[in-house]
Image (cartoon, rainbow, N blue to C red):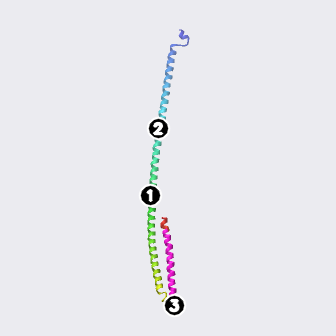
Amino acid sequence: MQDQGLGHSPAGKQQTNYSQAQTGRKTRENRQKTALFFVLVILLWVGLVGAGYFAVRKHLQKSEQYFAGQMDELKAENQRITEDIVGAMQLFEQELAGSQEEMQQIRREMDMIQEEMELTGESITGTDATRQSLAERITELDQQLAGLQEQLRKLEAAVRAL
């Protein structure tokens, strides 16, 4: 009976055991909730990392395709420019060869006229019209030669520039 006087009754023991059981259950539930929360957070983190990885991978693949396309376009442009340059150089070479041939022909003509003048220079007792005609022809040929030499210099400079 003393136990009853101290405020400890058998019913109180049951109540204490019951409250301890409830506290233990609540602690277990809290631990389970915490564990579940951490598992969910870890799954969310893994999901975000995985999604980020695949998004970055897809972006890198698109970038790689874009740059590969750009490289192909640049290669095609370089090929076109190379073909244009080769065509221009061939044209310049043809013009240069034609100009050189023209210059050779003019030089031959001038040499022939010079030779004829030397051969007939003293025997020409005719009018000044013949001399003037020959002088005009020589002047004309000199001008053509000077023009062709200038054109040749321009062509050679253009070929060197390419």
Say how many tags the image has: 3
The amino acid at mark 1 is Lys
Mark 1 → mark 2, Cα distance in angstroms: 43 Å
Disc 2: which residue: 46
Which numbered circle lies on residue 54?
A: none
Q: Nearer the viewer, residue 103 or 117?
A: 117
Q: Position of residue 62 (x, y in %)?
A: 45, 49
Q: Nearer the viewer, mark 3 or mark 1?
A: 3
Disc 3: which residue: 127
Q: Which residues are magenta?
A: 127-156
The amino acid at mark 3 is Thr
- Identify the residue at image location x=49%, y=21%: 21
**Main secondary structure along the magenta-highlighted residues:** helix
Question: Neighbour class for label 3 at 10 Å: few (<14), some, many (≥20)?
Answer: few
Tag 3 or tag 2, which sits nearer the N-term? Answer: 2
Q: Nearer the viewer, residue 48 or 102?
A: 102
Tell whether label 3 touches label 2 (CB within 8 Å): no
Q: Secondary structure at mark 1?
A: helix
Query: Which residue is farthest right?
Result: 6
In the displayed structure, would residue 146 be above or below residue 82?
below
